[in-house]
Amino acid sequence: MSVDAAVETKTVFGSEVPQPPQHGAAGGVMRRLNFGTGLVGGIGLATIAGWVTAIITPSSASSDTFAPMEPTYVYLAVLLGWFIGFMLGMGAFVGPLRWVVGRDITHSDAEYMAGKDLGRKRYWKYTTDHKVVGIQYLIVAMLVLGFAGLLAMLIRTELGMTWTSLFTPSFYNSMIGTHGIAMIIGMIVIISGPLGNFIVPMMIGARDMAFPRLNALSLWLFVSAVPMLVSSMFMGGIQDGWSVYYPLAAQAPPGMLGYQLTIIVFAISTAVASVNLMTTILTMRAKGMTWSRTPIFVYGIFAASVMGLYAFPFFQYAQILGLSDRVFNTSFFDPLNGGSVWLYENLFWLLGHPEVYVILIPSMAVALELMPVFLRKPLFSFNFAVAGIVGVVALSGLVWAHHMYMTGWAPAANYPFMLSTELISIPVGFLVLVAIGTFWRGTAWTRLPLMAVYAVVFNKMIGGVTGVYLSDVPADQYFHGSMFVVAHFHYMLMGAGLFGAMAGIAFFFPKMTGRFLDERIGSIGLWTAFVGFQITFMSMFVAGLQGQPRRVLDFDDQFNLSNWISTIGAYVIGIGMLIFLSAIITSWRSGVLASSNPWGSKSLEWQTATPVPLENFPVLPVVTDRPYDYGVPDPYEVEFDSTDEDLTEKVGTK
Amino acid sequence: MSTETLIPEEPEAPTNRPPSMRRVKLWLQRPYARKILILNVVIGFLLLPLAWLLLAGMNQTGAPASEIMKDIEQTVFVFTIVSIPITAFVFAVLVYSLLGWRHVTGDEPPMQDSPAIRTNRIGVILWTVSSTLLAMFLVVWGLVELAQITANSFGSIAANEQPGQKSAEIINVTGQQWVWTFEYPEHNGLTSDVLYLPLDRPVYFNVTSKDVIHNFWAVELGVKVDANPGAITQTGVTANKLGTFNVRCAELCGMHHAYMQTQIQVLEQDAFDSWVRESGGKKTS
Amino acid sequence: MARRSRLGMWFFIVADVAGTIALVISYTYLWSLNVNGGWAPPGATLTASQTNTALPTTPPTASFAVEWPFWAILLVVVAATALMWFGYRSARSGNHAGLLIGAGLSFLVTVAALVFQWIQISTFPFDAGDGAYASAVLLLCASNIFHLLLLLFLGMGIFMRARKGLIDKANWYQAQLTGYYMTWVCVAFLLGAILTTFLVVSPNTDPAIFGTFKQQ
Amino acid sequence: MKKFLVTFLTVLLGGAIVAGVGVFNAVQGEAPPVLIANVVGTKTAPSGEEMPHAELYLDVYPNSSSQVPQPETKSPINNVLLDGQPFFHPSTSLQVPSNSLVTIHFRQYDSGGTIYNPYFAKVHGTVDGKMKWNGKEVTEIKPDEVGHTFTVHQYPESTQPYFFMSIPLPMNPANAKTDKMGYPVDPQIISVTFMTGEAGSYVWNCEFPCGDLYQEFGGPMQTRGWMAGTFDVVDV
């Protein structure tokens, strides 16, 4: 059927401009595709590809270093087959193909893809509605973090049982590698994914993201990458830490392919998501939402997108080069044939450090976003918050080599990189200033989200101060590669990042699910995790000071005590996190129903109904004032207007 | 985009607003101000012992055994001291906002709002200036210390030329999976699996690897540099303390990374010479 | 919609630029280091790497690649880009035939470029195992092929849609965005050609021999 | 209260999953059975004193065969990746008595080549710095005729004596006469005697590149049971 003129001129989903004439019929195969067909396609194609490769590869095939290549080729074929088959089965290629042949997605198709009248089914489909994508992101990210947390528990168990060795060294190494990269991926996604997709368009008063289909694409690329990562555990694992330094990675079993393809796919997903978020924020803010009226969380997500966009390709290409080293026997990272280990380290850390801020800035931003609501006062010095974020983004690309002080790649470069690294403490300091300035004289409404912010600021301070030691070359000469580093970046990424994510989820939970996150259970989980966190990583600092190298499964007796304590703390964290998870589960199913604006917030996302209707706002809102317009006139300041000599006493006796 | 700037328009200051210094004085008379400052000082003093505890941790196995390690510990000590006040201030505000200023519970948003402090020029300026000064101090200190450490590591080369100076002992350090070997080229290639160092004599390390990246970490000497395949990295040290110390690999290098460790034996010069003689090297000059 | 899509395309180009920069960094870094004398393909220049037993034996026939094909392919891609811009201008001015011709020819020329690129790769005087230069050049060509395939996709799309009259004054921007991307691809090809022409013999003549403390 | 039940169950389930995965992998990664050097009498140390004397027999095979099965591993992928790779037989988890003289007899069936670091073509850590190779006593072998090495090194414990021993195991010439299994008919016979001190646990591995992938140090070189293992000195 061809679509009639009435539909043509109507606003097509996510945009207010009239569409070109619709060609081609609505409906078609894409309406029958869902996660199930994706799994079928992925597993099916993977099986076929692996089987065929196993047949055509001569079992005698070997690289020039006698490595039996058959498992490598088969595993590679399986991974690629899974990826292509899964995306096919999800229907990711429908849109592009129909664009090429000029049969555009019709209006009714667009609405169907947006999940209109699909009920729960839309969560299992290639749905373009940003709210659905946000929920999907939340679930998948929590699964990834759970997987990484499981490995963390096993690692700490191994390190705690100092009298015996539970796992083989190889398996221990593959655990630390997989734990690291899985945590990094999960942490990158846990805020920008759920909150960035679900909340940001509503926060800026838009009906959806700029490119709804790219939104779904980024999610399902991410989903397709997860099984690749997990599968590598069964192919010998990633035995080289999360930064798979070459040439050690060239000795790893085929599991390394899982890592490389995961990163290649995940980098595409990040680029797509970043482009989408940036375009949305730049072009779709509501009328009157000038930059000074844009909430700080939007700034945070935008900054994270910028850094992800320019930094991830370096990591991706590093892995592509490594892949071609392994499969095509090139020699980018093979020093025997003119490859350089420093090349990999530079490419890796060109992502590696901005990525830290990709995790940190959104979590700080969400903390700053919710503080004014619970302290009933405006954000302290909004433009300093913006300046802090902008400063971090500006410096983020100039500090990567502080991870390479001790590699000797360019001793002279240590001076400028130490300079830039310690300069970055100034914009980060701005964010802390804004936080404490907002706490200043505020009447704290001590609900779970705000309490989490206290934890975030506390951990952020410790992480920041210990970071100053590591940014300084002389001190780093002792701390580099020791447990001290591990404790430091866990304070940053987990203490600030993950607790910030918990704050954000607790804050936006009523808007996302229509129910409150259970206050009691949630708080118990949060503070259990917090206490365990301090125990674990404080004692890890001690181990580092004593001189325990990182990534060792066996160590001198002098480190036993601190490792025992650290392990106990880790178990406490695990329990706390599980309690928090159970709070999410129970509240989602049967929590206390929340009104559309339970926190009495004044920003846009809370002004629409809960559950949020398909296009968010019946009529697009118009912004007339700055955000965070809470608060009463300051009594002290008021008195200056009636200045007289006994003012001093009056104030003094207050 | 809008033409508006990022800065939200400041509320117009009343004409009879007192001058800044007086406002500070008035501010100090506010009930919470002194409390926070006192809290700040108290927390600061509670944190102060950290400066020594950190060193205690680092000195457990006999460090510092060289000038470099002394510099490192000095840096750690100073950084701890200077970062305590600002940390204590943030903690003080956190504590006071929970215990000092009012806080409410309950399911409904509190009826009464807090004072609308959109910004505070004095506070912002104070913070910016102090944090910038702090960062600048850290940078300058770091650069100076780094220059000094570099001098200490490579002074051994200079020592070769200087007359009357004890000449440097050159040691070729080879890392490979998962053992260290130390070659003394000046003693017809005498090689050992334990690192023997002469006391108070500059030592100059050439470091390389035969397979993957290792990291040559002489813990108590504060020496650390990567052993890279296909490249030679250099460093140096002057051990100034007798005893047995540790070499550890500080870069993941495969299955037995945890076991890639060996000993450092710092010996008196003559003991060192006799070791060289017994193990087949020529007598040192 | 046009403004949004344009921004999106610019951002995608930014990501692509970053990736290409990563390749350029790899090429120049390896060229400048010449680790273990392994930059040049064995036989191209007699570095002491032959004396290094650690090196696996490789055919002495290998040598540096010829420069002119890189520039030839660059010219072809520039032609394709020019045609696409011509088509865009026509679409802008409502000249539908011009759009069809421009897009169609651009597509065909892109196919030609792909063929040339493939011929060049298959006739390189070295294979992937012959040291860092070979690796870097081969990966530059691989990224070229990747870019050309994207251009094929876009060009075909523009042509088909033009035939259906989907690209008219109302949404000519799709042709324009394709033009943007093709222009960037030209720059990428240019970078590759410059590297492979001007940075050939490594400046580092005495690299350390792998695993030893001797210079070559 | 139902909520708290769910919480309790969640924590329980999570703990169960962690424990399950942990136990599963611990079982999969079980070390090979311990090979104990039993005391066979006494021997005179160079110092002249009588010390208990223990003996240990180790063979090095280039690959598995019907005669010599591959080291058993519970992780399925290892069976695929390490098929046809060299290994020590019968086990790589060794245990020797403390404060005694221990003699290890090696039979080396594998070929070989040039070792990266000539230091490991020398004998280190035996009582007289020598080893007995096919009947004659040597202190080192040609660096380009090494088959494997048996290198015991320091375990990161400051509380136990430093112990370093490295024995080069010469290669079999390429033209050596082989039996139907493809193994040399008369392998290289090496025997070394060394003195153990106080109890302690150490690790050992082969320093000759006989694995696969980069520098031939992957695969079996990085798998206990093949070319690396543990070396425990215990009080008896």
Image (tube, rainbow, N blue to C red):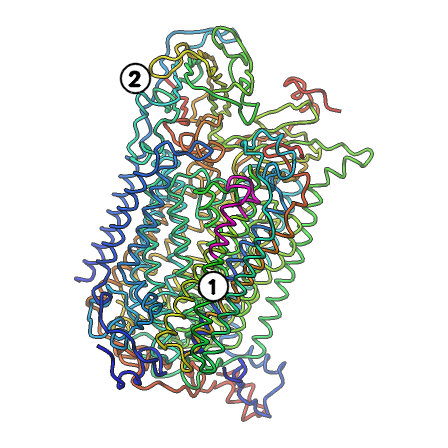
Residue shown at 30% from the left, 56% from the top: A143
Residue toward you, A569 or B18: A569
Tell me which chain the residue with mark 1 is part of: A
Q: Which residues are magenta?
A: C114-136
Residue B284 lies in quadrant: top right
- Name the dominant secondary structure of the magenta segment: helix
Report if residue C77 lies within the magenta region.
Answer: no
Q: Residue A184: in sight, yes or no?
A: yes
Q: Position of residue A86 (x, y in %)?
A: 29, 56
Tell me which chain the residue with mark 2 is part of: D
Give the Cα separation between the discs numbered 2 and 1. Answer: 58 Å
Label 2 sits on residue = D67
Q: Check disc 1 and give the amino acid type.
A: Leu
In the rendered image of this protein, does residue C186 appear above or below residue B231? below
Residue A130 lies left or right of residue B98; in this view the side is: left
Report if residue C134 lies within the magenta region.
Answer: yes
In the rendered image of this protein, does residue D190 appear above or below residue D18? above
Label 1 sits on residue = A309
Residue B109 lies in quadrant: bottom left
